[in-house]
Image (cartoon, grey):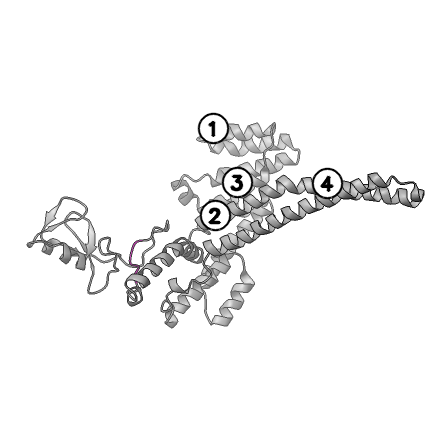
Amino acid sequence: MDACQNVEADVEKILAKYNKYGQKWQFQLHRFISTLERYKKEFESQGSGIDHCELSSTILQIKLSIKEITNEHRRWHSDVSRVGKSIDKNFISDYTEASNKKVFKTDHEKEILNKIICLHLYKDSKWEVAEEFLKEVGLTIDDGQKQHYLHLNHIVDCLKRKNTQPAFEWVRQNKIHLDAKKSDLEFKLHQIVFLDILSEGNHYEAVVYARANFNNFLDKQKEIQSTMGMLLYLPNIEQIRDDVIDLFLKESCLSDDDLLSISVNVGCSALPTLLDIKQAICRDVGGVWNENDELPIKIDTGFAYHSVFACPILRTRSSSSNPPMMLVCGHVISKDALHKLERSGRLKCPYCPKEQLPSEARVIHF
């Protein structure tokens, strides 16, 4: 993000210069062109009757202005070149230092990756691409899972075409789940139907629809009042429709469990830090990172997904020889960390003042 902001700042400087001088020079050039065209017409009609002193003065002004424009253009060229240097400085084209070639070394791991890619294509309504991808990699996806994504994407397409019936049917089937979450989806669907009727100029029908359906939402008096106020001031309906579609995607979890998007986002967030760490480790204690498959430090990416337990003390993953251990106070650390923290047969929790015996810790399974 910092790299993008740095490059964007350089681009904005160039645009500011162009906005300052560009229109000025364009105006002068058009004025000079018009003046020369006028002299051309006078020369063709009058011949030698043209005032040569005035013509010479005009040509001299044009030459000076063109010279000034040329010099300014050279400065712009320098600024544009500086943007290229800024891009090279802020963005790294070679990311092999932060990659791990052993990640997808087994057929099982490759199959998991291909399945994640295929599910992403299904969620994004790329059905033909997904089916062709399945054929080429030799995978099979459960038909029930396919139909689930097909149905949800069909509802989204219907919402974009102002057809809310499939969405209302989905809300009816999942009403218990939505009510438990206190979801606004059903009310928002009625609201968009009300606005679609209103946009067609049918104010009376819109009021009738509101009376028939808004009575079921007594806890949304302020929202209903705001919606009825749209009878006088019609809002941006397409923006509200997009908000309803986003809400449906959220409630249906169609956009929440996209593992490919999550992996890409985590990678993009962690990549700058990984490159810095890799460079420092290879320079100071070369080869250490290559010998382990865990990160040497914690990287905050905004996500907290762990397939296994990671010790908060040693920053290492748990294993059969180093299982997670729950202390008497309820905090969990790895077995290796427990042994390192032991002092004279006693153990003090690293997170609270509780003291205990190491033998009181219990192995836990996730």
At which x and y percent is residue 246? 50, 45
Mark 3 and mark 4 in contact? Answer it, CB < 8 Å. no
**Residue 201, picture quadrant:** top right
Local SS, label 3: helix
Q: Which residue is mark 2?
A: 6
Task: Say which mark, if any, is on residue 189.
Answer: 3
Give me the C-alpha separation between circle 3 and circle 4.
Answer: 56 Å
Local SS, label 4: helix
Q: What residue is rendered at 28% in x and 67% in y?
A: 291
Where 14 sits versus 364, above or below? Answer: above
Quarter occupied by the C terminus: bottom left
Label 2 or label 1, whichever comes before in sequence order: 2
Where 186 sits versus 231, above or below? Answer: below
Give me the C-alpha separation between circle 1 and circle 3.
Answer: 16 Å
Q: Which residue is mark 1?
A: 221
Local SS, label 1: helix
Local SS, label 2: helix
**Eye-nearest disc, 3 or 4:** 4
At which x and y percent is residue 128? 56, 64
Q: Which residue is mark 4?
A: 28
Q: What residue is rendered at 93% in x and 44% in y?
A: 47
Label 2 or label 3, whichever comes before in sequence order: 2
**Eye-nearest disc, 2 or 1:** 2
Label 3 or label 4, whichever comes before in sequence order: 4
Label 4 or label 2, whichever comes before in sequence order: 2
